[in-house]
């Protein structure tokens, strides 16, 4: 009985920003747990090659190309999925960008772009998914938070503010959508080996800081999010909502 709780067979998962990085790792992991995957990105070439690679590995993959920050495109994408009879049971709001600059030098337009993509888009995509989940009487929403949902680091203010907002958006979703049997939770990755962190990984001082500051003394690997993603996407978490689970080697819990 216990392991079937984690079985995602018959479920469809939309993961935004899933042609690479953390989103791609979670898409592959949810596919291995049995889910059909709706792969999303805004770069057509990267999205198509990711879908082909996953299909060759045996995953059932649908491509949904849209920019999460373009509300009209998001609405149209969900209408297209409706028309194709594709019901999204699991949403992973993963798409996000980083923009590192001290606030004294930060243009408001750059601030706004990070907020639009990393926070507002999760509300818009979440709302469109939840409308349909509510009609079906069940759904799983997994927002991707961050260590910066709890702690600030200099030079990443808009990202920090957005990720702090993601933590509270997750609780707001839990508050409003619990009665519709939608569970909304978040995963807070630690310092992970991703393209977005290339500049940090290749900086010896920052690399040493991460290893010293993390109890496990190492960076995390994208595939190390998969177990938590499967748990939050599955029946194993049907009475869990509003939570943030940090997958961070212990970093957020220690000084
Ligand atoms: C940075 C990093 C972090 C990590 C992650 C930590 O510049 O500090 O990009 O933001 O990516 O979000 O949880």
Image (cartoon, rainbow, N blue to C red):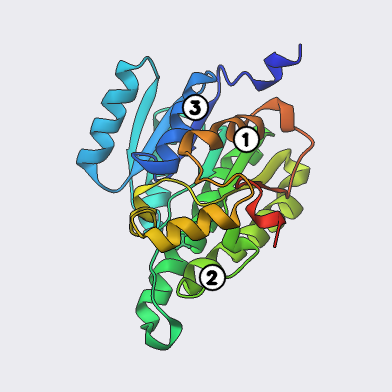
Classify mark 2 as within 8 Å of ligand 1 or not, answering yes or no: yes
Residue 235 higher or lower than 164, as above or below: above
Residue at 45% across, 75% down: 155
Structural distance between the alpha carbons of marks 1 and 2 = 25 Å
Q: Is residue 87 visible?
A: yes
Residue found at the very far bottom of the displayed protein = 104
Q: Which residue is mark 2?
A: 153
Q: Is residue 140 left or right of residue 67?
A: right
Task: Tell me, yes or no, whether the two marked residues, 2 and 3, touch with CB atoms within 8 Å.
Answer: no
Residue 151 is situated, as x and y percent measured from the top left of the image, at 63, 66
Which of labels 2 and 3 is toward the front?
2
Q: Which mark is residue 228?
A: 1
Of the two numbered discs 2 and 3 on the same chain, state the one appearing first in sequence: 3
Q: Which residue is mark 3?
A: 29
Residue 240 is situated, as x and y percent measured from the top left of the image, at 76, 39
Q: Is residue 146 visible?
A: no
Structural distance between the alpha carbons of marks 1 and 3 = 10 Å
Structural distance between the alpha carbons of marks 2 and 3 = 30 Å
């Amino acid at each position: 009985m216990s392991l079937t709780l984690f079985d995602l067979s018959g479920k469809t998962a939309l993961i935004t920003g899933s042609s690479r990085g953390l989103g791609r790792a979670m898409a592959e992991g949810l596919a291995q747990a049995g889910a059909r995957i709706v792969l999303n990105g805004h770069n057509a070439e990267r999205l198509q090659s990711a879908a082909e690679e996953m299909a060759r590995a045996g995953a059932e993959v649908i491509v949904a190309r849209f920019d999460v920050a373009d509300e009209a495109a998001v609405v149209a994408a969900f209408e297209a999925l409706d028309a194709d009879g594709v019901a999204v049971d699991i949403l992973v709001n993963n798409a996000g960008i980083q923009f590192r600059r001290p606030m004294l030098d930060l243009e408001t337009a750059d601030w706004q772009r990070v907020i639009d993509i990393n926070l507002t888009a999760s509300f818009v995509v979440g709302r469109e998914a939840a409308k349909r989940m509510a009609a079906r009487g069940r759904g799983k929403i997994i927002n991707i938070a961050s260590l910066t949902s709890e702690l600030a680091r200099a030079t990443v203010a808009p990202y920090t503010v957005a990720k702090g907002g993601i933590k509270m958006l997750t609780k707001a979703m839990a508050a409003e959508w619990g009665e519709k049997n939608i569970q909304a939770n978040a995963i807070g990755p630690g310092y992970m080996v991703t393209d977005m962190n290339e500049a940090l990984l290749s900086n010896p001082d920052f690399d040493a800081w991460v290893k010293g500051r993390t109890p496990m003394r190492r960076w995390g690997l994208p595939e190390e999010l998969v177990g938590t993603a499967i748990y939050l996407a599955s029946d194993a978490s049907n009475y869990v909502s509003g939570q943030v689970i940090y997958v961070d080697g212990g970093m957020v819990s220690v000084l």
